[in-house]
Amino acid sequence: MTEAFAVCRWMSAAVYERRLNYYGDWFDSSAIDWINEVLAAEGFDGRLCAFSDGGQGLILFYGDDARIEQLRQVIPQPAWGF
């Protein structure tokens, strides 16, 4: 594992920085939490939510809690879930 560095710049001129773990072809899922923190700080009502693709991948959806709950009802997720 090595370390990666992510920077996000928004139209508000705020700069958000975070160190992420780099696992080669594996995604550091803490990036989703970070992006959600940035979205909240920027005043967005929704968040990213990860759903399994049934394999080793994931599908990201953006929405408010009600929309995410609707998606959970129609998109089957494995028992170990996201």
Image (cartoon, grey):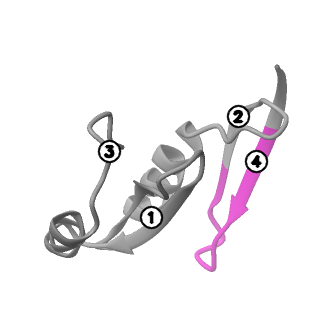
Circle nearer the viewer, 2 or 1: 2
Q: CA distance from mark 3 to mark 2?
A: 26 Å
Q: Are marks 3 and 2 in contact (CB under 8 Å)?
A: no
Q: Is residue 65 visible?
A: yes
Q: Which residue is depicted at the point 80% across and 40% down?
A: 25
The magenta-colored residue range is 5-16
Residue 59 in the image: x percent, y percent? 50, 63
Q: CA distance from mark 4 to mark 2?
A: 7 Å
Q: Earlier in the sequence, mark 3 or mark 2?
A: 2
Asked whether the beta carbons under mark 4 and mark 2 sit within 8 Å of each other, the answer is yes
In percent of the image, x 32 and y 44: which residue is there? 78
x 70%, y 34%: residue: 20
Judge whether 73 appears above or below 4 on screen: below
Residue 49: give its label: none
Amino acid type of disc 1? Answer: Leu
Nearer to me, 39 or 81: 81
Q: Neighbour class for label 2 at 10 Å: few (<14), some, many (≥20)?
A: some
First in sequence: mark 4 vs mark 3: 4
Residue assigned mark 1: 39
- Disc number for residue 20: 2
Marks 4/3: CA–CA distance:
30 Å
Q: Which residue is mark 3?
A: 78
Q: Earlier in the sequence, mark 2 or mark 1?
A: 2
Q: Between marks 4 and 1, how big is the CA–CA gap? A: 15 Å
The amino acid type, in three-letter code, at marker 3 is Pro
* Spot occupied by residue 60 in the image (x, y as percentages of width and height): 48, 64
What residue did someone put label 4 on?
A: 6
Kind of residue sitting beneath label 2: Leu
Binning the other alpha carbons within 10 Å of mark 1 as few (below 14), some (14 to 19) or many (20 upward) gives some
In the displayed structure image, the side of residue 41 where residue 22 appears, left or right: right
**Number of numbered discs on residues:** 4
